[in-house]
Image (spheres, rainbow, N blue to C red):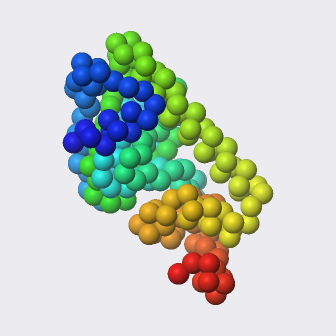
Amino acid sequence: MYARILKNISRFIQLNEAETAYFTSLLQERKVSKKEFLTKEGEICRHTYFVNKGCLRTFYTDKEGGEHNVSLAIEDWWAGDLYGQLTGKPARFNVIAMEASDLLAIEKKSQEELYLKIPKFERFFRILAQNAYVASQERILATMTETAEERYLHFRDRYPEMDKRIPQQHIASYLGITPESLSRVRKNLTRKNKIN
């Protein structure tokens, strides 16, 4: 149950046996069904989630009811409303399971205790936050400078598994284009033999 998360953590910090035991004692196993919400906009966000199996989607709902995907998370990824976690304010985003998912959750309070008992975890979660920030900046820049086709090709290159598992409408929202535009892009790329 903990093999994947411990491997994920070991990319940035090394834990001894006692630290591993303490960390895993703070984790809560969650099994969620498809379309089950983990966080709803306006609620207080109390957990950060690690995806052991499955797929999560973080999105914002506008005043007209349109959904805008902020992030997608499959196995070996972390998810949650970082804004709510960092500010303590109600969540701005919804987090929902796109597939039946097996997750490991850590409560904000437990995470703060973890920082005090094992300070190297501050480094680990700082690196996660930095990586999320960089990815966010790259997406903003891509939206301003790249065509829909370029954005889609970069998405496929970076996340080949997601392109196969996530419905086209959610990929389109993530890329900041309409599903119809993505459909045209895909047809055009198929004609050029760039995708199959």
Position of residue 6 relative to residue 75, above or below, is: above
List x then y, in percent, for residue 169. 51, 69
Asked whether residue 109 appears in the rendered view, the answer is no
Position of residue 162 relative to residue 190, above or below, is: above
Q: Quadrant of the N terminus?
A: top left
Residue at x 44% of width, y 69% of height: 164
Q: In the rendered image, which quarter is residue 109 located in?
A: top left
Image position of 113 (left or right of 146):
left
Residue at x 47% of width, y 49% of height: 58
List x then y, in percent, for residue 90. 47, 33
Position of residue 90 relative to residue 148, above or below, is: above
Position of residue 112 relative to residue 167, above or below, is: above
Question: Residue reaching furthest right?
Answer: 145
List x then y, in percent, for residue 188. 66, 82
Image position of 134 (left or right of 24):
right
Total count of labels: 0
Question: Residue reaching furthest top?
Answer: 116
Which one is in front, 92 or 193? 193
Residue at x 46% of width, y 62% of height: 162
Residue at x 42% of width, y 27% of height: 13
Which one is in front, 90 or 146? 146
List x then y, in percent, for residue 166. 44, 65
